[in-house]
Image: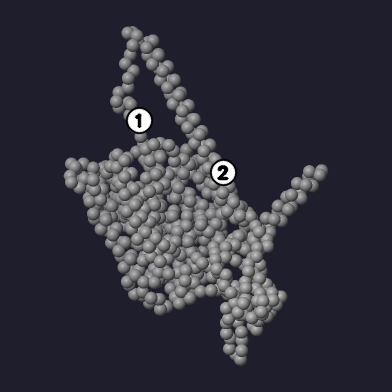
Amino acid sequence: MNKAKYLLLLLTLTAVSCHHHDEMGIDIAFLEINIREYHGKGNISVLAQNTDCYQCSYVEIGTLPATNGDAINVTLYANHTTVIKLVEIEKNENKSSSVPLCTLQSILVQEHAFYKLIVRSPDDTIHNVSCQIIPYVSSEDAYLPILFLFVTLTGLALVWTVVWILFKKLYRYRRWQFANFSNNEQLVQSDLGSTNTTPSEGELQIRKPTRLASLDTFRGLSLTIMIFVNYGGGKYWFFAHSSWNGLTVADLVFPWFVFIMGTALAFVFSSHHRKGKSKWRLFVQIIVRSIKLFVLGLMVNSTSGRGHPIKLSELRIPGVLQRFSLTYLIVALTELICSSGYTRQVLNEEPRWYHRLRDVIHFWPSWLVAMTCLVLQIVITFAVPYDMDGCPTGYIGPGGISKEGEYFNCTGGIAKYIDTAVFGKRHIYQHGTCKNLYQCHSMEPEGLLGTLNSIFLCFLGVQAGRILVAYECPKARVTRWLIWSFLLGGIGALLCGASQNEGWIPVNKNLWSASYVIIMASMAFLLLSFLYVIIDVKELWSGAPLKYPGMNSIFVYVGSETLEDLVPISFYVVHTHLAQLFLNLWSTTFWVLVSAYMYYKNLFVSV
């Protein structure tokens, strides 16, 4: 009986604690400002500035009388450092003046912790005001669930590796036993007492599958991370998209997906050319597939109504699959028209002086299209004037409170202007990543201008595929991929100045800036090299389970987007990092399991 009471009490306390944390919210800390030994003549304005908010003005988060004993409670975000400034506002004869009291630089607080800010002046004047922050209620480290997750996944990966190695050894041992038994049977049954059991040279060669598992694994890795961050990523800031300039984990996966689509295209067109397929038939297939992707994207966007029919006047037209559709259309048509060298020149020609660069030289028309897209995007962004609330030509900032709010309505510059002119204000994305930090207006991250750089990125993926087609030696393939990776990485670092905000062209996912797509391509070449070596060359890993969603990517993505609110994919949990992290992991794992089931049932969905 005592044990039952103790268990009931424990469950009650746990539920109360979870409810308490749920009410407090995620990444929130509390600051109590106390006035002690100071008597002012007006009110004290509490101003705050997030250090990640580039060139932002201070925002008032509270006011209190400048008299001894007064206090106020304010909230701070625990995921980034904050600058706090206290200013006394005095009013005299219908005029007001501000007197700075103190400034606290780079305050980094912990989630759900409580702090006190003590304001005092020994001589009761504004000249010797001191401000001191004192923590008085600490909290647990919000990043402990990440550490626990890392240790758990590492342990599971080690167990899986050991089991896989033992399975392979047992399989080879059984094959060796069977081979010896067969040889002995042949010796017994032979009239001469001996038989030639040496296999031919062709029999010694193990025929490997033509489909590269590393490509499916790369695609599956990108898709799995995409689903995880779209479901919330445990509500950690680094699993969400950047507010404006910069990179987070969430910013990596979409461009990688575009890159690997281009890599697969090179394989597809190489096969089509060798089989002599009709170009007209391929043209029709490209158009039909592009239309299917675009329509699927509209269907995915229509699910934002959360169970209610969405108004057509508010339907978002651009989107992820729409971006894929337009990118695929341009790149595939270019490859169809300009890629006859896949068979006639690259694969069959005699070695010449440029033979080591045949994967580039023979495809110069495609490179011309790719470079045109890149240059056109840069020129339009920085040189074409436009009329939108007085925004200056070449502006690529977040607008809002950036630059003291001078360009409040200029979010994204001409990129937003084009999308608004083509689609209308109500048909673009309404929940931009810059809203919370910069208080900016809506911004379409999959807009038309950024599609030009998406096409360029896809062409770089096609280049990775051409290397696979043109060179059979793994060393030649990996060497060229690494050269491309380091070359593009250097160009990207030069464009962004190796900084978040100060370079010529900052890294920006919302705009799909030139530096962003070039750096993403650099990382993609590097990751593809790594996966190719360990999966297809060394065969240290089969690619499972990540290769399963990579082989049914369209089905998994559309399913994850349209069914995200349904049980057992999603359900209510308390609003803490730990609970949200495991919910989002489970939701992601669900789709990996679905794709694994489809793989073993030989079910593959394509458009």
- As drawn, the residue found furthest toward the right would be 1
Left or right of 5: which side holds 564?
A: left
Q: Residue at x 45, y 77 (%)?
A: 406
Q: How many marks?
A: 2
Q: Residue at x 55, y 57 (%)?
A: 236
Residue 347 drawn at (x, y percent): 23, 42
Quarter of the figure with residue 127:
bottom right
In terms of secondary structure, where does tag 2 sit?
Answer: helix
- Which residue does the numbered mark 2 point to in the structure image? 152
Q: Residue at x 49, y 30 (%)?
A: 166
Q: Is residue 445 above or below residue 545?
A: below
Q: Earlier in the sequence, mark 1 or mark 2?
A: 2
Crowding at dot 2, Cα within 10 Å, few <14 / some 14-19 / many 20+, comes out as few
Most foreground residue, 561 or 477: 477
Left or right of 176: which side holds 86?
A: right
- Which residue does the numbered mark 1 point to in the structure image? 206
Crowding at dot 1, Cα within 10 Å, few <14 / some 14-19 / many 20+, comes out as few
Kind of residue indicated by mark 2: Thr
Most foreground residue, 171 or 356: 356
Most foreground residue, 269 or 522: 522
Q: Nearer the viewer, mark 1 or mark 2?
A: 2
Residue 200 shows in the view: yes
Residue 274 drawn at (x, y percent): 26, 42
Residue 202 drawn at (x, y percent): 30, 27
